[in-house]
Each structure stands twice: as structure tokens, then as C-alpha cells.
Image: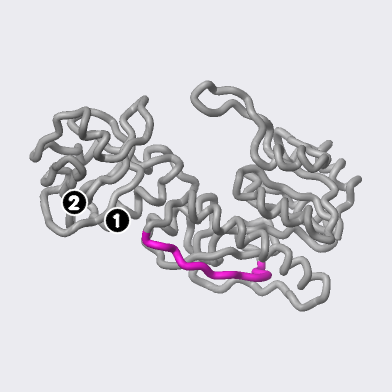
Amino acid sequence: MNIVFFGTPEFAVPPLGTLLNSEHKVLAVITQPDRPGGRGRHVSACPVKVEAGKAGLKIFQPLKVRDAGFIAELKRIAPDAIVVAAYGQILPSAIIRLPELGCINIHASLLPKYRGAAPINWAIINGEKKTGITTMLMDEGMDTGAVLLQEETEIAPDDTAGALSHRLSETGASLLIRTLEGIENGSVRPVPQSDGATYAPLLKKTDGFIQWGKSASDVSNLIRGMNPWPGAYGFLEGERVNILKAEPVEGNGEPGIIYRVSKEELAAGTGKGLLSVLEIQPAGKPVMTIRAFLQGRRIKEGMRFITDV
């Protein structure tokens, strides 16, 4: 099968790599334009562009995917199918309807749950025990197309969004190959999505503010779901800190108030239970264990994280 691949972040690299090691032919890779990033704001290539460059593939980086010249180039390439994995732009009908076998999207949820841009993050934040990968035949809606195949996976109690994304990208790569084989031999047919859709909107940095009035379990889920980006944060006695790892522990206390401090523990009250902070990052500093953090500060019981901004 002749394929054009759309993808941008690390999540899309395993599916592209698996395609390159299969019997299918990748005619071109479409990815987002190079943009500045990191602390120095240096312009750098995205992970998919790096991978495609190593393979010597033809690469396109349209500023706007709806550009008529770009669509004309896709028509000239004439792929049998288009594969999409976390590309980052909404494809117009002219592209969706272009290939004979359609546009196949790898989506990181069990559709119709968690349609949208951040399904992995919101599944963890909402305390889900399972999620998965769906391959779907794209239409003009937001993740509303017919389902091709699905594979379920458990969400571990210590999974972060980063760890779960890595695992799901590998699952998506495997499921993609099975989907393409099924389309070719007729064993996989699109099935309309069922009712009960939920949504996973794009995350904003402000979504990471820790509301200590929620339960310790909910706050822990937020911290895991925001790791590595955009990060969960709070203000301890006025100092902004990112919290990268924490766990609920026995006890109760007023939200945001520190109730237990020792050389290796900092536990604060929540709306239900205590939350023990395990990894923390002060502004402008590296990530550190709570032990290292406490060595440099005089944190005492009764100090507090502010509960609103």
C-alpha cells in the first residue's frame, strides 16, 4: 500500500518507524513547520521530521494544511491511504476524501470516549483505570469517524501522561499494521461510533494549577496527567513550584496546609486525605527529590500552599 504519513511529536515516531519496516511504502511525510522551543527558544525539527530525515523520505511542512498548492501536491503523489498520528492541524475535506482507502487516524483513547487533542492527559486526570488506541476512518468531525480497530490497556497507578503516551504509541504502531492488513484483505470494516462521547480539550498551562480543596487522589491524578506538560504547580508560601510526583497518604487536614515535615517527607492537606510530595521543581531550578528540596529550605508544619490564584 502506498501511504502518506502525517505526524509531528514523539507519539507519532513508532507508527512511522513500523510503517518503514513493513511491506507498505511511505511516499512522503507531512509534519509541522520548525518552531522555536526550549529555554533558549532555538528553532529545531520535530521528532517525526528527524525520523523521516534519517530514512531519506520526502518531507513537507505546510504552514497551513489547507493551502491549495499543498493539496495539489498531495493529489500528484496520489497515495492509496493517508495515515495520521498526532499531526496538529485539522485536515480539510479535500484531503480526507483524496485517497481511495481514506485517511486512517491513530487516536489515543477508546472512542467515543475522549475525543479531542489531549485524551491521554484527561484519562489520567479523570482517574480512568483503562484507556487504549483506536484506529478510525477520518471524517470532517472531531474524532467522529468510524472505528476500524481498538486495543485496550490498563492505566497503572503511577502512570504519567509521558509514560502512558510512550506505551500507547507502541500499541498504536502495532494496531496500525493490523488495520492496514485488515483493510487490504477485507477483514476490517468501519463501524460507526456508539453513543456516549466525552471530550479531551487541548490543555492550557493554567489547567495545571493544583486545587488543594480536591481529594488527595484527584490532586495526584492531576499531577500525573500534567507530567511532563504543561506541569502541575502550586505556590508554597508565595514560591511557585512544579510538583512532578506525589501520592495520597493516610491522614486529614485543611486544604493546602502542611501537616507533616521531616527530612524525607512533606505532606499537605487536601479536601480528602493528605498528599505526600515526592518530586518537586522550584522555578528556574532542576527537578529534585523532596529530600533535596527540604535540605535547602526551612519548611515547617503550618505553612501552606495557596488554594486559589
Q: Nearer the viewer, residue 261 or 49?
A: 261
Residue segment shown in magenta: 146-157
Q: Secondary structure at mark 2?
A: loop
User: What residue is shown at x 89% (from left), y 51% (from top)?
Assistant: 78
Tell me if 294 is positioned left or right of 198 in this view: left
Q: Nearer the viewer, residue 41 or 201?
A: 41
Q: Which mark is residue 270?
A: 2
Q: Is residue 151 magenta?
A: yes
| Badge 2 or badge 1: first in the primary sequence | 1
User: What residue is shown at x 51% (from left), y 67% (from top)?
Assistant: 153
Q: Secondary structure at mark 1?
A: helix
Q: Colour mode? A: one colour
Residue 228 lies in quadrant: top left
- Work out which residue is located at the far bottom of the displayed protein and give it: 187
Tell me if 256 is positioned left or right of 150 in this view: left
Residue type, numbered disc 1: Asp
Q: Residues within 10 Å of mark 1 (few under 14, many from 20)?
A: many
User: What residue is shown at x 79% (from left), y 38% (from top)?
Assistant: 59
Residue type, numbered disc 2: Thr
User: What residue is shown at x 77% (from left), y 37% (from top)?
Assistant: 53
Q: Which mark is residue 218?
A: 1
**Above-or-below relation of 174 to 255:** below
Q: Tell me which secondary structure the magenta stretch mostly adopts.
A: strand
Quadrant (top left, top right, bottom left, bottom right) of the N terminus: bottom right
